[in-house]
Amino acid sequence: MRRCLLVLIAILALSAPAAAAGSKTPAANIDTTSTGATAPGDPYRYVALRGGGDTVLAKIKRADGAPVRSRRLPGRLVVAAVAQDASTTGLSADGSTLVLAAPRGSRVPVTRLTVVDTLTLQPQRRLALRGDFALDGISPDGRRLYLIEYRGGRADPLDYAVRAYDVAHRRLLPKPIVDAREPDEKMTGFPITRAVSADGRWAYTLYAGGEEQFVHALDMARSRAFCIDLEGLTPEALNGMHLVARHGRVDLADQSGDVVRRIDATTFRVTTPPVAAAPGPRRPNVKDEPPADGFPWGIAAAVGAIAAAAAFLLRRRYAAGVDSAASRAASSSTPTVP
């Protein structure tokens, strides 16, 4: 069973497309089979596989892909995507709670989520929310969920808000989470990619395609959000870029790894690092340059030294051989008496 499961995971990881065409909402219909859900520093990854009309949830080791446990769950469930590059969410930073979602497509009247205990893979709660929501994050202790509420339907897929959900009390908190510095500014755009801080507290999501290009910083421990504008960048320029959460900062890097913008994780100040100068032609070291006559005297000296050392060793071996032969002749002329 475990071997078959591992083979199935590998096949799906190679064959699953990154996204499906015709998404009605910014992060809908993205295949997360190969991505799965994990958290910074967590040794496990959780993948949801289709098993007929049900779901096979598998817990595997990140280090070598070895399966640890699997369980069949009723109904169709997936690991939630949060960006176009198949970045995912759902696992709490303490590793105790996993949240799976029903597949999303067109606008749905009820959103269903399943809260799973990661030790046993048993469902702990089944949540049903009236309206069209998508999972966007989970607090480090698993007690609070963060959701994207789509309010505009098909007419305006970019009309959405960030909401918080109290898992223990099964209730949606009344006020949307907005940037307190600009509470009236509408959040629009498509989520491109995401990075999470090492402690699992902050989720940084790159958005493009709206009025402004920005990074949405969501504090999943204290239910706060900050929108960080990226001035001077177009949606086209952000193609292929990714976020890297480092100690004290978040870097926006291009495909070659060069940092295009740097965000201070405390003040959210954005700076543009200086572009590294392209390396010029290597100037030969004076010691490596051949003399004016073109003869490689350095190499000749090295060869001569090696030859001298070899001759010295040969002379020693020859002398040792002569002495040994003389000793053997002397010993053979005198018989040994027991």
Image (cartoon, rainbow, N blue to C red):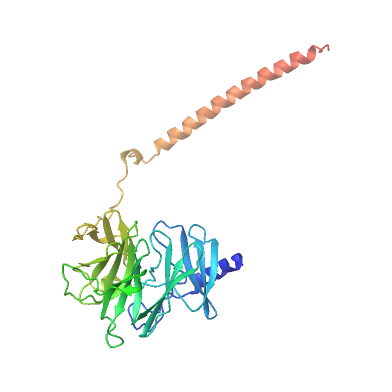
Q: Which residue is at a point 31% across and 49% down the rendered structure image? A: 282
Measured from the top left, where is residue 165 in percent x and y?
32, 71
Q: Which residue is at a point 30% across and 68% down the rendered structure image? A: 205
Query: Relative to 257, does residue 132 appear above or below in the rendering?
Result: below
Q: Which residue is at a point 34% across and 60% down the rendered structure image? A: 200
Q: Residue furthest right?
A: 338
19 left or right of 318 in image: left
Corner quadrant of residue 145: bottom left
Comparing 244 with 313, the one in front is 244
Comparing 129 with 67, the one in front is 129
Comparing 39 with 20, the one in front is 39
Q: Which residue is at a point 54% across and 29% down the rendered structure image? A: 310
Q: Residue furthest bottom?
A: 155
Q: How many marks?
A: 0
Corner quadrant of residue 302: top left
Quadrant including the C terminus: top right
Query: Relative to 62, does residue 104 appear above or below in the rendering?
Result: below
Comparing 43 with 129, the one in front is 129
On the question of residue 220 being in view, the answer is: yes
Measured from the top left, where is residue 303 in percent x and y?
47, 34
Measured from the top left, where is residue 311 in percent x and y?
55, 27
On the question of residue 240 being in view, the answer is: no
Quadrant including the N terminus: bottom right
29 left or right of 156 in image: right
Corner quadrant of residue 178: bottom left
